[in-house]
Amino acid sequence: AQSVSQHNHHVILSEAASLELGCNYSYGGTVNLFWYVQYPGQHLQLLLKYFSGDPLVKGIKGFEAEFIKSKFSFNLRKPSVQWSDTAEYFCAVTSPGFSGGYNKLIFGAGTRLAVHP
Amino acid sequence: DAMVIQNPRYQVTQFGKPVTLSCSQTLNHNVMYWYQQKSSQAPKLLFHYYDKDFNNEADTPDNFQSRRPNTSFCFLDIRSPGLGDAAMYLCATSRGAMGEAYEQYFGPGTRLTVT
């Protein structure tokens, strides 16, 4: 069955530290990949997405992610985090091969990031 | 500005008492989804509608039903809630299922408590 693994459940950083959150998926076909963010008390929001083309994707708020097909990975990075980045981050994958081509998103369990001033 | 609206935000129901959660959208999207998210777990797709075409996930319990009377509204009915159904229920929409339409937009969720 298709699945998404996020390696770290909790990450604690100080402001200005660099961030990398791991994401691996298990599916051999064509994939579309997403990172969603959920700030405290708010709904899931799209941070960035990969459909095709340049495997290095830039998103909002200085985040970027790199799709490495050979490693089935889509890690999220930010060179310098801020206190306002405190949130839960979810990696998700979908594919035309899922559910008869419909838009089935499979999520990872999430990573809680706490940034201390 | 609200695009995907869920009501209520918090719902308390009694064990076995039917409950309905509501979702509406102002995006005119073709696809609407319901997810269940338990504490510290990934959101899990229950079912989705592509227009009027209902698609149930194989492992969604029969206790969960859905209705989509029109493009804008979708309901989640839990016929006999058990304690294990306490969770956050997320509604999402997408324009379609191909290409750039893959992006899903989420509502704020309804937190269901079962007493």
Image (spheres, coloured by chain):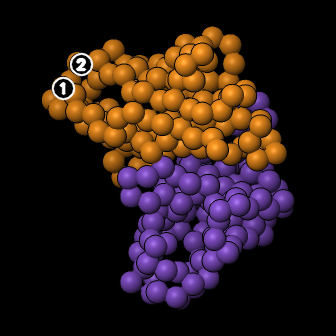
**Residue A28 position within the rendered picture, expressed as x and y whole percent measured from the top left:** 69, 28
Looking at the image, which residue is at 63% across and 71% down? Answer: B61
Looking at the image, which residue is at 70% across and 59% down? Answer: B57
For chain A, what colour was chosen? orange
Q: Say if residue B69 shows up in the picture.
A: yes
Looking at the image, which residue is at 66% across and 50% down? Answer: B93
Looking at the image, which residue is at 49% across and 41% down? Answer: A108
Quarter where residue A115 is shown: top left
Three-letter code, disc 1: Ser
Q: Residues within 10 Å of mark 2 (few under 14, many from 20)?
A: few
- Rendered position, A69 above or below A89: above
Q: Say if residue B95 shows up in the picture.
A: no
Q: Secondary structure at mark 2?
A: loop
Residue marked by disc 1: A14
Front one among B5 and A64: A64
For chain B, what colour was chosen? purple
- Rendered position, A108 above or below B37: above
Q: Do the numbered discs 1 and 2 sit on residues whose CB atoms are within 8 Å?
A: yes
Q: Secondary structure at mark 1?
A: strand
Residue marked by disc 2: A17
Front one among A34 and B108: A34
- Rendered position, B26 above or below B89: above
**Residue A19 position within the rendered picture, expressed as x and y whole percent measured from the top left:** 32, 22
Image quadrant where one finds the N terminus of chain A: top right
**Residue A97 position within the rendered picture, expressed as x and y whole percent measured from the top left:** 77, 37
Label 1 resides on the chain identified as A
